[in-house]
Image (cartoon, helix red, strand yellow):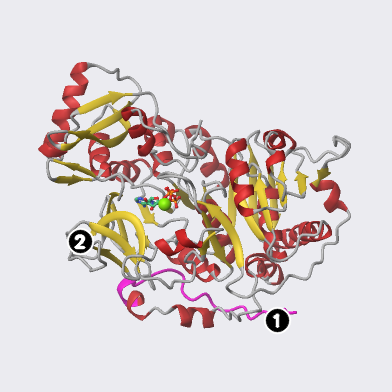
Amino acid sequence: MKNNEIIDKKPITDGLIDYEKIYEKFSWETLKKELNINDGRVNIAYDAVDKHAQTWRKNKVALYWEGADGTCQKYTFLELKSLTNKCANMLQKLGVKKGDRVFLFLPRLPELFISMVAIAKLGAIAGPMFSAFGPDAVRDRLQNSEARVLITTPELKERVDTVLWELPKLEHIILVNDDKREGAEEEGNVYYHTLIKDSSDTFETEWMKLEDPLYILYTSGTTGKPKGVTHVHNDMISHYITTKWALDLRDDDIYWCTADPGWVTGTVYGLWGPWLCGISLYVYDGRFDAAKWYESIQNHKITVWYTAPTALRMLMKAGDEVIEKYDLSSLRYICSVGEPLNPEVIRWGSKGYGLPIHDNWWQTETGSIMIANYPCLPIKPGSMGKPFPGIKAAIIDGKGFELPAGQHGLLALKPGWPSMLRTIWGDEKRFKEYFNVNGWYATGDTAYKDEDGYFWFVGRADDVINTSGHRVGPFEVESALLEHRAVAESGVIGKPDAERGEIIKAFVVLREGYKPSKELEEELKIFIRHHLAAHAYPKEIEFCTNLPKTRSGKIMRRLLKAKDLGLPTGDLSTLED
Ligand code: ATP
Ligand code: MG
């Protein structure tokens, strides 16, 4: 048993004050020592919940939860400690032990957050999934991970029932009743609230090695079949410091990460990172709605907001009049991740919210933010920012040689940061492929670095378009289109062409009040010629009412392309309705 002595250290710093100096001096080893981490005596759940429950933070609210119907609940760190202990005891009684996979197919209910922590306390491996997944997506993940237990709701279980016969390894399904009513239970089912009622609220947390697995998250499936990225308890070192320095979270913040834990952003920065830092989280378990989102910021006095370009583009589409109806003055810091953040969105945000939006870049595989815009550095709209301290990022050619500033190439990272993926579950071969280019971790994205060391995203390596000898990233065309007053959103692909290699095709969603027409099509083409480059103009434009997106809100360009060319659509398990 680890002794429960607490040395309430002064935080390492209140924020990243001098980027260059800290980047130069930073060492993961030193940070690990400062955090008092002893291999074999760790558990992220202890550091994220139990530890705070023994300090002045015990009565601090860890979770402000709001349901789609407006119901609000709150949980302090002390209450969370007790609830996660009860849940861990319940799982243990069902036979769950260290290393077992427990999957979660839940809306963003408090029980989702509680279960994730409880699973970690047991030393088991959590697998959060989007509650909007269909039966096939759930089956694929449960099969691949050989999950023993699934926690879901009675409604969602109906989707699982259709594939249950394909899941021989699944031993228990625990049901979370939305209304937590007793008596509303069907025989033969196992109910969360019935089981935890008699569970003890003390639990001996399993002490782990830093390399013991913590969670499996399947990638967004933007480029193909999702991969089961496996992370370990050691990730907490990265979670902690990136939350502090890239999201700039401080003890008095009320923080809202709009991502679902079914996406890595929702697991790392919607749970572990902020709780490791003892921050109060707000969670809204409802659908996107511009007015409701602003109301949440206003009513809950959100100070730091972490969201995604898709959401921001939708908010921009909803217009400034909605913003004006709400008091958003509590906000002090806004971040975005998941897709390239169009400069136009940053400009609009700076006006509408009076705050710049800080883009940052990372992947399910990297387990934490790798490149970011920081409070202490100027933002260059359209750039992802600079590498996080302790992260060496480079632009390389196909052989692994570093390219000079300004040249497009593969975005690569030097392996060895704490939250780097440890394997692809059940596919060690695929895991090794990430390191095929001369020992670099190859991200699969293309980018360039400017003279000041800022990184600029060009596109997924597969999405970059080769037209008449020019390499064009879809992002630059999409961003240029967004600067036209009629455009709400667009997805750009390369289409094979005998003469030019590829031509550029843009799928365009119009803003309210604009209608598709030949004239508008021509206007957009001319607009791109003038604003971007003659070679980058979309030879074909197709107007549409929406774009295919993943559950994490990423434009699925491969699907636009497959449909356009009449090719097989590939894995669609993560496609939004
Ligand atoms: P899959 O690997 O299954 O195709 P995915 O790559 O979309 O899915 P994630 O790990 O969720 O799955 O996303 C990581 C990718 O998202 C990055 O490789 C990059 O292409 C994109 N991305 C994330 N943040 C940014 C950003 N700030 N700017 C540009 N692209 C980003
Ligand atoms: Mg990926």
Asked if 503 appears above or below 202 in the picture, the reply is above
Picture quadrant of residue 178? top right
Q: Toward the viewer: 275 or 138?
A: 138
Which residue is at a point 55% across and 68% down the rendered structure image?
236
Question: Tag on residue 5?
Answer: 1
Badge 2 amino acid: Asp
Which residue is at a point 50% across and 52% down the rendered structure image?
227
Badge 1 amino acid: Glu
Query: In the image, 27: left or right of 504?
Result: right
Picture quadrant of residue 50? bottom right
Which residue is at a point 37% across and 47% down the rendered structure image?
339
The region drawn magenta spans 1-21
Q: Which residue is mark 2?
A: 450
Mark 2: give few (<14), some (14-19) or many (20+) Cα within 10 Å: few
Question: Tag on residue 502?
Answer: none
Query: In the image, 181: left or right of 266?
Result: right
Q: What is the count of numbered marks?
A: 2
- Is residue 236 rendered magenta in the image? no
Question: Dot 2: what SS?
Answer: loop
Query: In the image, 32: left or right of 101?
Result: left
Q: Main secondary structure of the magenta part?
A: loop
- Is residue 19 rendered magenta in the image? yes
Mark 2 or mark 1: which is in front?
A: 2
Asked if 335 appears above or below 312 in the picture, the reply is below
- Residue 442 in the image: x percent, y percent? 35, 61
